Image (cartoon, helix red, strand yellow):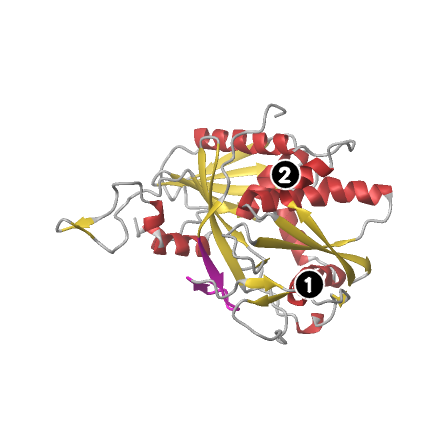
């Protein structure tokens, strides 16, 4: 995987949608937030934790919301000449294309996990793949290890998960609002960018949850910002660990969706943030060039390209009831797969299948 960096087309946004507090789909941008930090950076991220409305992690949404957007915007997938014609006139209705003319549909988070796989030695993953009308849909399946960890999570760790959501409320506000929100924090609402890109011969469409944007007029995704919180590293080992593990995931996530800027709130004392630091996504790999035993962005993208190529050679039967389950687990040396034809792990909903 150490050869040259593969061709990766600059990501472009082809649409967006919002999810409300009940996780209902809205074909609009009403959940998009502006980045507007206060003048004084001193936040207690534990504030309001007792009122936190966490979404139900037992409800597995799969690709559902992304499929709702695709279903409403099939014209975005038509090739030239595929427009539907009625009585010699182009109809306003969506094109009658029977294919999305796209190799892969998935979430950005799934691709991030794949990008980081060459350097993963702790976290197993499972991805279900289905070929339908020429497109491979890729949806993550929770591993037993992740399920056990979620169900047995200590209160302290639950609170630490809350900190990231609380941080967002300190430094953002909805584009549509004037004052600050005083409502309890929830992690159900979301604004999602729908992104198109290409990695070598693989055309990709994926959904990426976006934290906020700048007020500049630059076109999306060039105005988007990813927000992060982290314990501030204090010694050489902590700095190395931060660069090796956290920066890899931060870079992979933002680079995939074309998000140019990451703003991190660093905690020096428990849950208190007193410093913001900005990272330019494209510069992150160069910050690490002279460090020992670090990650290499070329290896990440070459792995992803070869994995997608292999996936296309395996997932060849076009059938929404057939699922190929790919898994990566200890000793973290190779990806294996199983094939299911009895409806087990099926994730494309019937309503979506019937729209073709």
Q: Position of residue 264 (x, y in %)?
A: 70, 54
Say if residue 182 shows up in the picture.
yes
Tell me which residue sits at (46%, 40%) in the image: 204
Q: Secondary structure at mark 2?
A: helix
Check residue 16 for magenta coloring.
yes
In the rendered view, tell whether residue 191 sits above or below residue 138: below
Boundaries of the magenta span:
15-27
Nearest the viewer among 177 and 293 is 177
Quarter holding the N terminus is top right
Q: Position of residue 349 (x, y in %)?
A: 39, 53
Q: To which residue does mark 1 refer?
A: 167
Tell me which residue sits at (78%, 33%) in the image: 291
In the rendered view, tell whether residue 336 sits above or below residue 164: above
Q: Secondary structure at mark 1?
A: helix
Q: Could you classify mark 1 by the number of other residues whose Cα lies within 10 Å: few (under 14), some (14-19), or many (20 or more)?
A: many
Tell me which residue sits at (73%, 71%) in the image: 47
Q: Position of residue 139 (x, y in %)?
A: 50, 46
> Residue 297: which quarter of the image?
top right
Q: Residue furthest front?
A: 217
Q: Residue furthest left?
A: 87
As measured in the structure, the alpha-carbon distance from the residue carrying label 1 to the one carrying label 2 is 25 Å
Q: Could you classify mark 2 by the number of other residues whose Cα lies within 10 Å: few (under 14), some (14-19), or many (20 or more)?
A: many
Left or right: residue 58 compared with residue 284? left
Left or right: residue 137 compared with residue 111? left
Say if residue 62 shows up in the picture.
no
Q: Position of residue 187 (x, y in %)?
A: 60, 64
Mark positioned earlier in the residue sequence (1 or 2) = 2
Nearest the viewer among 341 and 222 is 222
Q: To which residue does mark 2 refer?
A: 116
């Amino acid at each position: 995987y150490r050869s040259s960096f593969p061709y990766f087309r600059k990501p472009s946004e082809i649409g967006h949608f919002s999810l409300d507090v009940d996780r209902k789909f809205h074909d609009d941008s009403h959940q998009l937030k502006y980045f507007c930090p206060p003048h004084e950076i001193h936040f207690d991220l534990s504030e309001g934790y007792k009122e936190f409305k966490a979404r139900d992690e037992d409800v597995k949404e799969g690709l559902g919301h992304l499929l709702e957007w695709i279903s409403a915007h099939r014209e975005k997938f038509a090739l030239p000449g595929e427009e539907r014609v009625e009585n010699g006139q182009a109809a306003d209705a969506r094109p009658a294309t029977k294919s999305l003319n796209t190799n892969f549909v998935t979430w950005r988070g799934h691709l991030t996990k794949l990008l980081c796989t060459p350097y993963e030695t702790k976290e197993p993953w499972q991805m279900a793949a289905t070929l339908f009308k020429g497109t491979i849909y890729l949806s993550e399946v929770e591993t037993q290890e992740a399920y056990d960890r979620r169900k047995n999570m200590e209160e302290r760790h639950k609170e630490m998960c809350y900190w990231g959501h609380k941080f967002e409320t300190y430094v953002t506000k909805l584009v549509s609002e004037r004052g600050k929100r005083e409502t309890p924090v929830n992690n159900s609402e979301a604004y999602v960018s729908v992104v198109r890109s290409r990695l070598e011969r693989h055309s990709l469409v994926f959904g990426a949850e976006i934290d906020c944007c700048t007020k500049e007029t630059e076109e999306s995704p060039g105005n988007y910002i990813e927000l992060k919180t982290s314990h501030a590293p204090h010694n050489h080992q902590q700095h190395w660990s931060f660069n090796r593990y956290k920066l890899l995931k931060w870079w992979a996530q933002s680079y995939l969706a074309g998000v140019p800027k990451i703003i991190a709130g660093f905690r020096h004392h428990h849950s208190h943030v007193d410093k913001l630091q900005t990272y330019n996504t494209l510069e992150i790999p160069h910050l690490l060039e002279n460090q020992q035993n670090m990650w290499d962005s070329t290896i990440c993208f070459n792995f992803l390209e070869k994995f997608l190529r292999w996936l296309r050679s395996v997932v060849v039967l076009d059938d929404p009831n057939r699922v190929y389950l790919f898994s990566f687990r200890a000793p973290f040396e190779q990806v294996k797969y199983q094939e299911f034809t009895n409806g087990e792990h099926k994730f494309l909903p019937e309503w979506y299948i019937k729209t073709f």
